[in-house]
Amino acid sequence: MNPFNRLLISELQRHLGRGKSILLLGPRQTGKTTLVKSLDFDEYITFSDTGVLVRYEKNPGVLIAEIRALQQLKQRRPLVILDEVQKLPSLMDDVQVLIDEGAGQFVLTGSSVRKLHNLLPGRVVKLQMDPLVYSEFEDANITLEAMLNYGTLPGILNVDNPLDQDIDLKSYVDIYLEEEVRKESMVRNLGHFARFLNLAASESGTLVSFRNLSQDIGIGHTTVAAYYRILEDCLVVQRFDPLVDRSSRRRLIKSPKYVFFDLGVRRVCAEEGAGTNSRFFGPLFEQWVGLELRRLMQLNSQNGQVKFWRDTGGPEVDWVIEASSRYCPVEVKWTATPTPSDVRHLKAFMNEYSDRVSQGYVVCRTPKPMMLSDNITAIPWQNLGQIPDLLFSKLSR
């Protein structure tokens, strides 16, 4: 039984209900298989099974014959689940034929987009499966500190003992990142990639210098950039772009940030122990808020982007939601007692873009919302989902 309330199921069922096929992407162990197996499907095929994989590799066209036979048997278009399709991307040609002739409706899952770029254009709806957002397990007795240390992968949250959680996270890194990512990406120098992975995890959420990393590892900066693309394609890191508004006279940072998809996986990759102080938690809290905002917007089909804003002269805002030419700035503070001095960068941003901003927020550990100025509110981290909801409700008016 799945103890978590996965919000993506309603969006998945909505698109299936209107006759669309689905490409469900997400890192391993985020719950894709559990989710799709809860559907009322007619056929389930997983390419994680080596025997199944070899059978379809050696018999081109067999999928078409099987699904056509299933359609005839059912006297309707069957729902077919193909799990881990990135292991056999050539099969997508057969899937396209079956979709085009109306012989089958598909849910395809994959843990890498590296071999799935530009496949089935216009024929499938792409959805993203991520680790759990807070609202999917808020009834559980899980602290914010635990989420920042051990992440929110379903299989990890189901483990009560922190020592066992660490063991499982290390196994995840060893098996998935060390083997699957390297194998998928055909990395030639495993030592360089291992060192890169360690440094990339340590630099998660910061502005990264490819040249500095290349000097530390002893490889070219173009190789560092290629390694980051590998992690992006394998859904291990998410890229956050800076907000660069041409109307601003400020000299704004134009380099992106890369944030590991799960903070527990990040910690193990960085070879760090579980932290206990604010110096450790502050930057992780900032990363968690950015990931959470992006995921909440995706789950609610809210069209916008989560970016960050930084002036080379100093002022910066941790996260900015950009939607319909409007901005909603969000500052992240570890404090439980925010003060007006915590909002000086928010005020600088809001003064710079006064015609596009109506409200700013400080996300922190305050137990209750607090007004810090006329248009800046401090809110508890548990209420983070209210920020995009309020923004998009205003935009819809």
Image (cartoon, grey):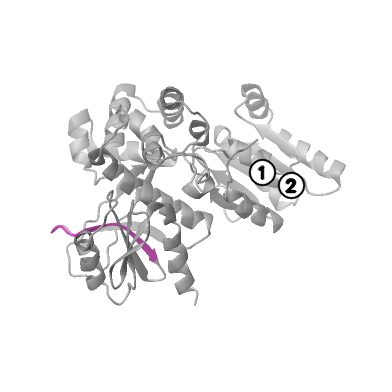
Quarter location, residue 33 = top right
Numbered circle sitting on residue 95: 1
Depth check: give the residue in front, 370 or 109: 370
Q: Secondary structure at mark 2?
A: loop
Q: Residue at x 34, y 57 (%)?
A: 307
Numbered circle sitting on residue 234: none
Depth check: give the residue in front, 374 or 129: 374
Foreground disc of the pair 2, 1: 2
- In the picture as drawn, the residue positioned furthest to the left comes out as 313
Question: Between marks 2 and 1, how big is the CA–CA gap?
Answer: 8 Å
Give the x, y percent position of residue 47.
Answer: 62, 30
As displayed, is residue 395 above or below residue 339? below
Type of the residue with mark 1: Val
Horizontal side of residue 381 vs 225, given as left or right: right
Q: Are marks 2 and 1 in contact (CB under 8 Å)?
A: yes
Quarter location, residue 188 = top left
Does label 2 or label 1 sit earlier along the sequence? 1
Horizontal side of residue 372 vs 30, given as left or right: left
Residue 91 appears in the rendering: no
Quarter location, residue 41 = top right
Number of other residues with Cα within 10 Å of mark 1, as a class: few under 14, some 14 to 19, many 20 or more: many
Number of other residues with Cα within 10 Å of mark 2, as a class: few under 14, some 14 to 19, many 20 or more: many
Give the x, y percent position of residue 291.
Answer: 40, 49
Give the x, y percent position of residue 71.
Answer: 81, 44
Q: Residue under circle 2?
A: 104
Give the x, y percent position of residue 43.
Answer: 74, 37
Type of the residue with mark 2: Gly
Look at the image and give the residue range highlighted in magenta: 313-322
Q: Secondary structure at mark 1?
A: helix
